[in-house]
């Protein structure tokens, strides 16, 4: 008769010890792998984004799901990222000689005041500043040294470390993506079982909401950003902006961040102003703002909010807050997190009859607020 309580006590003690050990090991494991967690999240985001296409490829070539199909998908993702960077580096190398020659000439002869300065507001003040700071070789050298000191001084080592770190993160992301695609079915089954045991029937809904949020965010940010870059590349080409396709590519990348494309419009306008094409400069900036307005206020809310059932205000908070906290990764993690929180909140208040709550919740000037229960 005494064995029952002892066995129960032992079982309870073993369960508590097992749970405590699991929590400690989980915390320790997260601490050990903290450097690689962004790479794992990136791999999950990419896998979720390409899953519809990858599932079709698996259905068509079922024999390649364990070897060459994950490898091909990983290589294509790598090329999709590295190809634009390679093009940008090549274009920058081509322009480096021209920039170096221009800087040498500016140091030797100064910068002559362009004609368009006389057509700007406060032309006399701008002209006076130009004559004092840029018209002579000495003034130009001082200004260039200031710019060089602010941009390069003390930052070269930091830039080098960041470049190495991001290269390692990118390489590990590709490695994680390969194994994630190869073991795709096993991972999905394990996540479903773990979600149901931990969250019950709500686990599948949360997983589906996260997937919809990530895909909706990719459609709303990446695809719309690419569309903005393509439209503006045509505008740059027509208006005579130097390197229109490279600038269009940079615009597409910047457009993935809300209000980020305006910086590229400004750079293009300044290039045109430097060429004396003030009318085209104004036109490029105005067209760019119209394109951004349509994309940010109509297309993106429809794509992101429609797939996540998330109001645009929370979409914007998720994007901007995610970028501030997690960098580029926050573009995708932020909206997915906000969408899941809103879904859980809606589940929590589901079934409430708000008409019964409206009289006591309506605070009127002639009635004191209700007492708390």
Image (cartoon, rainbow, N blue to C red):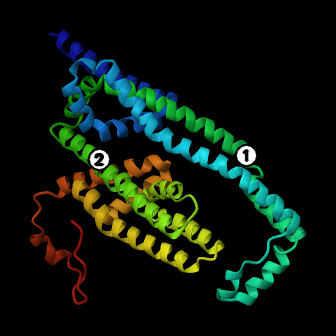
Task: Give the residue pinned by disc 2.
Answer: 215
Category of crowding for the residue at label 1, using alpha-carbon neighbours closer than 10 angstroms: few (below 14), some (14–19), many (at least 20): few
In-image side of 329 versus 279 (left or right): left
Front-most of residues 141 and 343: 141
Category of crowding for the residue at label 2, using alpha-carbon neighbours closer than 10 angstroms: few (below 14), some (14–19), many (at least 20): many
Q: Please, what secondary structure does the residue beneath circle 2 have?
A: helix
Quadrant placement of the N terminus: top left
Q: Which mark is residue 156?
A: 1
In-image side of 299 versus 145 (left or right): left
Front-most of residues 272 and 146: 272
In-image side of 20 versus 131 (left or right): left
Specify which label sits upstream in the sequence, 2 or 1: 1
Residues under numbered marks 2 and 1 in contact, where contact means CB atoms less than 8 Å apart: no
Q: In the picture shown, does residue 124 fall above or below 87? A: below
**Residues under labels 2 and 1: Cα distance?**
37 Å
Identify which residue is drawn at 76% across, 62% down. 147
Identify which residue is drawn at 54% across, 65% down. 263
Q: Please, what secondary structure does the residue beneath circle 1 have?
A: helix
| Residue 325 pos. (x, y %) | 49, 51
């Amino acid at each position: 008769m005494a064995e029952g309580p002892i066995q129960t006590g032992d079982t309870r003690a073993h369960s508590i010890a097992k749970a405590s050990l699991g929590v400690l090991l989980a915390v320790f494991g997260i601490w050990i792998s903290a450097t690689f967690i962004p790479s794992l999240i990136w791999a999950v985001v990419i896998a979720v984004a390409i899953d519809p296409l990858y599932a079709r490829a698996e259905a068509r070539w079922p024999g390649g799901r364990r070897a060459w199909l994950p490898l091909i998908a990983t290589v294509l993702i790598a090329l999709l990222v590295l190809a634009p960077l390679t093009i940008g580096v090549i274009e920058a190398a081509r322009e480096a000689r021209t920039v170096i020659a221009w800087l040498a000439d500016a140091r030797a002869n100064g910068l002559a005041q362009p004609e368009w300065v006389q057509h700007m507001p406060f032309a006399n003040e701008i002209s006076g500043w130009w004559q004092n700071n840029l018209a002579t070789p000495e003034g130009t050298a001082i200004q260039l040294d200031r710019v060089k000191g602010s941009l390069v001084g003390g930052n070269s080592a930091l830039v080098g470390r960041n470049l190495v770190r991001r290269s390692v993160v990118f390489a590990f992301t590709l490695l994680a993506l390969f194994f994630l695609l190869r073991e795709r079915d096993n991972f999905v089954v394990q996540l479903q079982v773990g979600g149901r045991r931990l969250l019950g029937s709500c686990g599948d809904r949360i997983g589906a909401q996260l997937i919809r949020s990530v895909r909706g965010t990719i459609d709303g940010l990446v695809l719309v950003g690419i569309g903005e870059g393509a439209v503006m590349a045509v505008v740059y080409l027509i208006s005579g902006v130097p390197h229109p396709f490279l600038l269009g590519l940079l615009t597409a990348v910047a457009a993935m961040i809300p209000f980020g494309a305006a910086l590229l419009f400004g750079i293009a306008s300044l290039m045109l102003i430097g060429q004396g094409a003030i009318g085209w400069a104004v036109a490029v900036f105005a067209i760019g703002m119209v394109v951004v307005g349509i994309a940010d206020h109509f297309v993106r809310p429809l794509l992101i909010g429609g797939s996540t059932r998330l109001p645009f205000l929370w979409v914007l908070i998720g994007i901007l807050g995610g970028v501030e906290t997690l960098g580029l990764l926050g573009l995708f993690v932020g909206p997915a997190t906000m969408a899941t929180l809103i879904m859980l909140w809606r589940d929590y208040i589901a079934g409430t009859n708000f008409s019964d709550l409206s009289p006591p919740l309506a605070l009127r000037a002639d009635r004191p607020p209700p007492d708390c229960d």
